[in-house]
Every structure is written in C-alpha cells, then in structure tokens.
Image: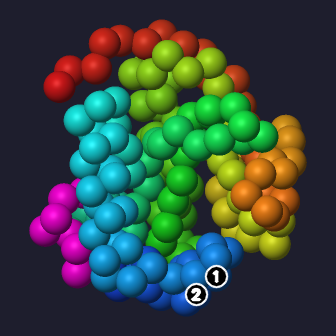
Amino acid sequence: MASADLGDMARLLADPAVMRYYPAPKTRDGAAAWIAWNENNYAELGYGLWIVETLDGAFVGDCGLTWQAVNGIPRLEVGYHVQTAFQGRGFATEAAAACRDFARRHTRSPDLVAITHPQNRASQRVAEKIGMRRIDDDLGGGSVRIVFGMTLNISAEPLSR
C-alpha cells in the first residue's frame, strides 16, 4: 500500500457498506492517514495491511497484520476490507490465510486474532475458515467486539527489509 493507492483506498474506506461495522466511513484524508499508518508499520515492523488484487490487477481491498489492543493487551491482528463487488468470493479468506502463514514464518507473536463486530458474521466466517475460534470479548473502545484467535506455530525467520 502506497500513496499511489489513495484513489482506490479512499473509495473502499468511504463505502458505507464496507465500513458498516466501523463508527463511520473514512474521508479521503482519513484514507491518506490509513496509508501513512501502514507505510509506518512497514518501516517499523516489516508488515502492515497490504493491497489485495485479482490476478489481472483489479483492486479488491486490503488485508494484513497490525497490532491492536484486546482488553488493553497488544495482540497481532489479521484485518481485511473487501469491495462490495468482490465480497462473498473468497478473497478475504485467501488473503487472511496468506497473512496467517506470513505471521507464522515472520513474526514472533505467539498468537493471531481477528477482532469483529458482533453482527459481522461474514468477517467471523473468514476468521473461522482460516482456523480461528472465538476466544474472547473485547470491552475496550466503548463497545463489545468479538475476538477470534489461534495459536501460531512459530518458526519465525528474520524479516528482510
């Protein structure tokens, strides 16, 4: 994800259907900040959210690994957003599984979580399909979020930068 992706990311993060379970869709400036946050994650951690595309290069959404607080404890999370036109076609599951595999090989995290809105059954199904199960409720941030998770079999290799 880079500044050149701003148009695609701004459309994705401004879509009320995609952002249904967020407090509000993001503005173009919010999308630019989202990209900057990920660029910072790449520089500091070697990973973040990445652009998801079809084999022919069509923009699908984003998916990747970020650190999020779960009940005040930092946890490695896999997150994903998919354009409505591509939802229900396995893109989030395929991308999330690739991120899970990356986390196993290239992070030192003992586990991986997916934080979901209680009503976001589609996101919960993605988490289940990649091997997660419901492990907790997160009570931070003013609303309850359902946390799915799994233990990672760590064989971490140093990240090449």
Which disc is residue 132 wearing?
none
Closer-to-camera residue (1/93): 1
Three-letter amino acid code at disc 2? Ala
As rendered, which of 29 and 151 lies closer to the eye? Answer: 29
Which residue in the structure is indicated by mark 2? 17
At mark 1, the secondary structure is loop
Q: Residue furthest bottom?
A: 16
- Label 1: few (<14), some or many (≥20) within 10 Å? few
Looking at the image, which residue is at 29% across and 31% down? 44
Q: Is residue 76 left or right of residue 131?
A: left
The segment highlighted magenta reads 1-7
The residue carrying mark 1 is 20
Give the percent coordinates (x, y) of residue 128. Answer: 73, 49
The answer to which image quadrant residue 26 occupies is: bottom left
Is residue 92 positioned above or below 44 on the image? Answer: below
* Amino acid at circle 1: Arg
